[in-house]
Image: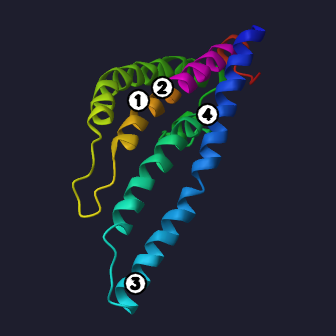
Amino acid sequence: MMAWLRGYCTVVTTLNRWLAGVVSVLVFVMVAVIAYEVVLRYFFNDPTVWALELSTLLLGPYFMLAGPYLLHVGGHVNVDILYNRLPPRVAALLDCLTFPIIIALAVIVVRESWPVAMDAYASGETSFSAWNPPIWPVKLLIPVTFALLLAQALAETIAAVERARSGGQKA
């Protein structure tokens, strides 16, 4: 593999690994927010108007920003019982076919979600709930996350082509 392609794969995977690690902390924040709500609601009969909505708004970044790294580690849905029985070269060739489908899907989602995110930002869109937080950051996260997924799928395609060329051995 050419050095610049290997460098691209390393940079993209490192960025996505770092983002997945950062957003994994959001699980603890969500648990704390929900625990706070439960204590206030059931022990003090004083529920919040914001806790459930905040935990929902934190869930989006948590699972979306971890997605590109999960693609790298194979954490997404796969028919492992069949895939793991394939010869390494055949598995690599199958990856060469499936990762471009992910790339195409990511391109479509980025293209379609970017204007929606920009409209939400321009209008200062909020949730219209009692708490009424801005939701444009979550909407902006959709094209950003799918751009990261696209970059990771491209890196995985490059690695799969290299594995197919080398007889299925990881580089």
Q: Which of marks 3 and 4 is in front?
A: 3
Task: Indicate the quadrant where residue 57 lies.
Answer: bottom left
Residue 156 in view (yes/no): yes
Residue labelled with disc 2: 147
Residue labelled with disc 4: 72
Q: Earlier in the sequence, mark 2 or mark 3?
A: 3
Residue labelled with disc 3: 40
Q: Dots 3 and 1: beta carbons under 8 Å?
A: no
Q: Is residue 153 above or below residue 56?
A: above
Amino acid marked by disc 3: Leu
Which residue is at 32% across, 28% downward? 118
In the shown orientation, is residue 134 left or right of residue 161?
A: left
How much space separates mark 3 and mark 1, taking CA atoms? 36 Å
Q: Which of marks 2 and 4 is nearer the N terminus?
A: 4
Amino acid marked by disc 4: His
Q: Dots 2 and 4: beta carbons under 8 Å?
A: no
Q: Dots 3 and 4: beta carbons under 8 Å?
A: no
Residue labelled with disc 1: 143
Amino acid marked by disc 2: Ala
How much space separates mark 2 and mark 3, taking CA atoms? 40 Å
Which residue is at 37% across, 58% downward? 56
Q: Which of marks 1 and 4 is nearer the N terminus?
A: 4
Q: Residues within 10 Å of mark 4 (few under 14, many from 20)?
A: some
Q: Dots 1 and 4: beta carbons under 8 Å?
A: no
User: At numbered mark 3, what does the secondary structure look like: helix, strand or loop?
Assistant: helix
Boundaries of the magenta span: 150-162
